[in-house]
Image (cartoon, rainbow, N blue to C red):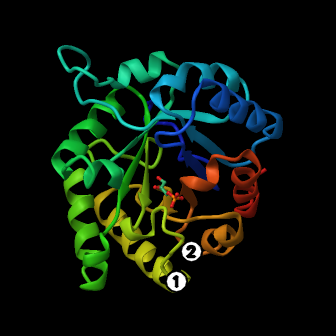
Amino acid sequence: MSETKKAPARPVVLGNWKMNGLRADGLKLAGELAERAARLTGTLGVFPPATLLAGVASRLAGTGIVVGGQDAHFEEGGAFTGSISPAMLKDAGAGAVILGHSERRHGLGEDDALVQKKAAASLKAGLLVTLCIGETEAEYDAGRTIEVLERQVAGSLPARATAANLVVAYEPVWAIGTGRTPSTDKIGTVHARLRAMLEERLEDGADMALLYGGSVKPGNAAEIMALPNVDGVLIGGACLEAESFWRIYTAGGGA
Ligand code: 13P
């Protein structure tokens, strides 16, 4: 990605489909989003399973909706059974990738060093990286949220990160898929600390999009996105239905 590119337009509303969607459902959802996206004022992105990337990307071509993968390997190619390289994501029509999601960090044992390697390779390939970080419930209860986030930012943010090529998503692990969210006060406090961390590390850290994720729904999206330092949201369950995904997007000022 060229260094002169700008940070993604606000609000940045991204939908992580996770391991959901067969071909018919995925293409239907993409079609319903395409109908709504006549004029996008912010950034709207979908991250379908790898099997649907090419189909969804071709359905959404010309709409301005970003399409991305949910993971990428750090190598360009070779003997890595089951893995997909950043170049392959691009070749399938993706312009972005989610890395470091808690379902991969905690579910599959990915650590900061691995996430950082994947992020560096994805930036090199020209993908917009969404780097996910977040504390577990035990870490939250122990008051260790900021310490954990500091460690994850230090360990997984790649050297070439800029506001134009990377977005940070704060997703408390205990808020994902549970219907529970931190209070808006807590989200605001964490995002202010994250902003300070990014400003300290990066020349353009003030411009880097900072997203919140974890049980975002049409009913809580507006108050979350109205918080200072919350530039958008990363959505799981509520993005699988076009109307609720779109309502979240418009709640953040996008249309
Ligand atoms: P939910 O919106 O289902 O809580 O999932 C959030 C998430 O993990 C997005 O990456």
Q: Secondary structure at mark 2?
A: loop
Q: Residue 228, labelled with which disc?
A: 2
Residue 173 position in % (x across, y down): 37, 65
Foreground: 16 or 112? 16
- Pointer 2 and pointer 1: residues touching (CB < 8 Å)? no
- Under 8 Å from ligand 1: the CB of mark 1? no
What's the residue at 54%, 25% (across, down)? 52
Q: Residues within 10 Å of mark 2 (few under 14, many from 20)?
A: few
Residue 177 position in % (x across, y down): 49, 62
Can you say which quadrant of the picture contains the N terminus? top left
Which label lies toward us, 2 or 1? 1
Residue 97 position in % (x across, y down): 43, 37
Q: Residues within 10 Å of mark 1 (few under 14, many from 20)?
A: few
Q: Give the residue pinned by disc 1.
A: 183
Q: In the drawing, does residue 123 fall left or right of residue 17?
A: left
- Looking at the rendered structure, the kind of residue marked 1 is Ser
Q: In the drawing, does residue 232 fall left or right of residue 109?
A: right
What's the residue at 24%, 70% (across, down)? 148
- Under 8 Å from ligand 1: the CB of mark 2? no
